[in-house]
Image (cartoon, grey):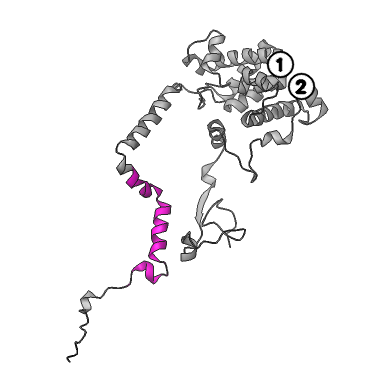
Amino acid sequence: MRLRRHRHPPRAVLRRRPLHRRRGLSLSAVLWLAAWLTPGLAAAPAAADAPGSAEATRASDTAAAQQLPQPPGTPRPSRAAVNKLVDRYARRAGLERELVHAVVRAESGYDAHAVSHAGAVGLMQIMPATAADYGVRSVAALFDAETNVRIGTRHLKRLVSRYGIGKAVMAYNAGEGALQRHGGFVTYAETQRYTHRVLTTYLQRKGVSAYSAKARQITGISLTPAMASAGASAGGRRGLTPREQARRMRGVDLSTLSLKVRPSLTDRALDPSVHDTGPESRPMFVLERPDAKAAD
């Protein structure tokens, strides 16, 4: 019986261990990290199976955006000019300037070119259908600050005369139909937050505590702290409407934020099948201010 000698491969055939192996990361962990960081790659096969779907989605989004009123290319009026308009038309409509300013601040943040996802336009976020009730049928005209404030104050005055201040603010946001269906107190989460924001601003300008008996006498409704966070989940978070998201982003200075990645790229941190969950688990990525203390 002859013994067969095992031949070793030539030295040139020998390969060094892959980089991810030498650093202690398994191949599955590396692949999982790549898929997690680039979710678009995972969706690529599905997109290939449905040719034209991405183009159809982009076309649909573009068509929806084109249907919204488009702001003019003219400069926006200054804050001082808007303040004068609000004060003048508030007096003309017989409304308190504090109330009108509170509505303008909540609706558009004093942006005469603001457009909501629902198609509301301008400083007081007038819907084209509402403007038509007051004789203005040109959507482009609603971007004119004076026209917008004139219609908005007329509409708000009619609501206040009919329902009182608190319910009028609810109707301004949700519509008179919603106010009537809800028995005079709209329970929509967005309307609750909107009403709380407008009325607390209005009362603060008047030097009145929002939850006092005097506030109830002025507004005709009882404000509660819970209205400010209506719709919040058990964890204290709630979904924001597109209008609220846009309003919040206008007040955020993105230059003050930075993305910090925790140095925890280990098999156990990357592999979802063995990842620990619970109060002691820690996120892989943390968004924090540059001047914040470094994480442990």
- Residue 260 image point, x, y percent: 51, 55
Callout 2, which amino acid?
Answer: Gly
Relative horizontal placement of residue 94, taking residue 127 as reference (left or right)? right
Residue 146 percent across, percent down from the top left: 56, 15
Which residue sits furthest front? 1
Badge 1 or badge 2: first in the primary sequence: 1
Q: Residues within 10 Å of mark 2 (few under 14, many from 20)?
A: some
Which residue position holds label 2?
220
Residue 121 x %, y %: 52, 21
Q: Quadrant of the C terminus?
A: bottom right
Residue placed under numbered mark 1 in the picture: 163
Q: Secondary structure at mark 1?
A: helix
- What residue is drawn where x is 40% and y is 54%? 35
In the image, what residue type sits under mark 1?
Tyr
- Furthest-right residue in this view: 213
Picture coordinates of residue 46 (x, y %)? Answer: 34, 44
Determine whether label 1 and label 2 are within 8 Å by CB. yes
- Name the main secondary structure of what is drawn in magenta: helix
Which contiguous range is marked in magenta?
A: 17-46
Left or right: where does residue 142 sit relative to residue 31?
right
Q: State which quadrant residue 147 falls in.
A: top right
**Mark 1 surroundings within 10 Å by alpha-carbon count, few (fewer than 14), some (14 through 19), many (20 or more):** some
Instruction: Calculate the distance from the C-alpha at mark 1 to the C-alpha at mark 2.
Output: 9 Å
Say which residue appears at 55% left-offset and 61% top-offset: 276
The kind of secondary structure element at disc 2 is: loop
